[in-house]
Image: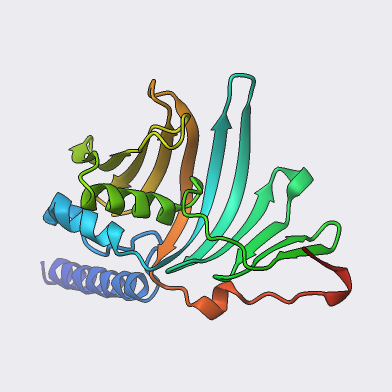
Amino acid sequence: MKVNKKIIIIGVIAILIITAIILYFFLKNPNKNLNIGNNLNNKTLQEVEEYILNISSYEAEIEVSVESNKNNTKYVIMQNYVSPNIEKQIVKEPSNIQGLETIYDGNKLTIHNSKLNLTTIYENYPYLTDNFLWLHSFIEEYRAAKANGGKTNLYEENNQIIMAVELSNSNQYIASKKLVIDKITGTIQKLVVQDKNQKNLVYILYNEIKMNSLKKEEVLAFRLQEDNIAQY
């Protein structure tokens, strides 16, 4: 019996040590998708909404499906954004435009084609907030609709939190957008752009997203090769 008790005690101690090690490494290296940080079962819908609306920066890998009457085109894109208007986007797929990079620094738009080693700069480029590929574009539209009496909807469905906004008639094709957030992990899962018949026009799946961690200098870290610059 004494031997058995010793074995049990040793086993318990081993389990405690292993648990402590696992917790240590988990806290030192948290999953970069868990950006809200706590189980959202303890958060109200309004708290989640407020968190999303106050995202100041993010970096993401997204899969984009653009649907039309004729075909469905897919892209894999890396995005970096820092408020209010710093953007960087790199295409990973398809292969024919792989490496195509666009950077907006708040004033000029730079387009770099790594395959052709060519760079084009557009000075005094107007900032376009209606780019449906960007999360912050959805955030601005949702915030504006709430402030101006537009149609927004915030609800929970199947352990998902949905933020939806109906858009004005300024765009005859795009009628609404829905952002889907996993309630348990707090991970942004997808952004869906629909027409007036609720048909998906653009479906964006977030493979990875890390929020509120970028600085302006990190997004704009980009060396221009002056010999290949064409300015317009």
| 166 or 1: nearer the viewer | 166
If the image is split into quadrants, where does the C terminus sit? bottom right
Please identify the quarter of the rendering in which residue 125 is found: bottom right
- Asked if residue 164 is positioned above or below residue 197 in the image, the reply reads below
Q: Is residue 222 left or right of residue 226?
A: left
- Asked if residue 12 is positioned above or below residue 154 in the image, the reply reads below
- Asked if residue 120 is positioned above or below residue 194 in the image, the reply reads below
Q: Is residue 63 visible?
A: yes
Q: Position of residue 88 (x, y in %)?
A: 59, 63
If the image is split into quadrants, where does the N terminus sit? bottom left
Q: Which residue does the image show at 37% across and 73% down from the upper left?
A: 25
Q: Is residue 39 visible?
A: no
Q: Position of residue 121 (x, y in %)?
A: 73, 66
Q: Position of residue 175 (x, y in %)?
A: 39, 32
Q: Is residue 47 left or right of residue 97?
A: left
Q: Which residue does the image show at 27% across and 74% down from the upper left?
A: 20
Q: Which residue does the image show at 68% across and 59% down from the upper left?
A: 101
Q: Name the outermost residue toward the bottom.
A: 217
| 151 or 48: nearer the viewer | 151
Q: How is the image coloured?
A: rainbow
Total label count? 0
Q: Is residue 81 left or right of residue 221?
A: left
- Asked if residue 6 is positioned above or below residue 88 in the image, the reply reads below
Q: Name the outermost residue toward the right.
A: 227
| 134 or 14: nearer the viewer | 134
Q: Position of residue 65 (x, y in %)?
A: 55, 35
Q: Which residue does the image show at 47% across and 43% down from the upper left?
A: 205
Please identify the quarter of the rendering in which residue 100 is found: bottom right
Q: Is residue 161 left or right of residue 87?
A: left
